[in-house]
Amino acid sequence: MFKFIRPEFFDIFGIGVFLFIIFISAGSLKTSLPIPKWALIILLVIGILGFLVDTIIVYLTYAKKMGP
């Protein structure tokens, strides 16, 4: 079939995501302004993509093996 990427590879993306969240949060606290709409859209996209990736990994790892 195809070779899966090691889970540690995704930690690289995690660093970028957490830096983004820290930057947006710190900026919002410093200026006392609410989080901008574009930042909320990016966080929503990150959440949806993360959910899809995790769902696919769980399906291929566990659910598919339990089938007939």
Image (cartoon, rainbow, N blue to C red):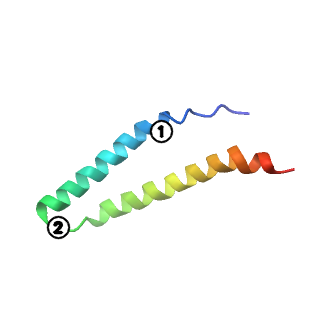
x, y percent for residue 42: 37, 57
Q: Amino acid at mark 2?
A: Leu
Circle nearer the N terminus (2, 1): 1
- Residue drawn at (56%, 32%), measured in percent from left and top? 6
Q: Residue at horizontal 76%, vertical 48%?
A: 64
Taking the image as shown, residue 34 lies to the left or right of residue 66, namely left
Query: In the figure, 8 relative to 24: above or below?
Result: above
Q: Return the residue at label 1.
A: 10
Quadrant in which the N terminus is drawn? top right
In the image, 37 versus 50, the foreground residue is: 50
> Which SS class for mark 2?
loop
User: Badge 1: few (under 14), some or many (20 or more) residues near its Cα, within 10 Å?
Assistant: few
Please tell me which residue is depicted at 14% across the width and 66% down the height of the picture.
32
Q: Quadrant of residue 12?
A: top left
Residue 37 horizontal/vertical position (percent): 30, 66
Residue to which mark 2 is pinned:
33
Position in image of residue 61 (x %, y %): 69, 44
Q: CA distance from mark 2 to mark 1?
A: 31 Å
Q: Is residue 66 above or below residue 5?
A: below
Residue at 79 percent across and 49 percent down: it is: 66
Residue at disc 1, secondary structure: helix
Q: Position of residue 40 (x, y in %)?
A: 34, 63
Q: Mark 1: which amino acid?
A: Phe
- Residue placed most toward the observer, 1 or 30: 30
Q: Dot 2 surroundings within 10 Å: few (below 14), some, or many (20 or more)?
A: few
| Front residue (pair 40, 26) | 26
Looking at the image, how many numbered discs can be counted on the residues?
Answer: 2
Asked if residue 67 lies left or right of residue 28, the reply is right
Q: Is residue 41 above or below residue 11?
A: below
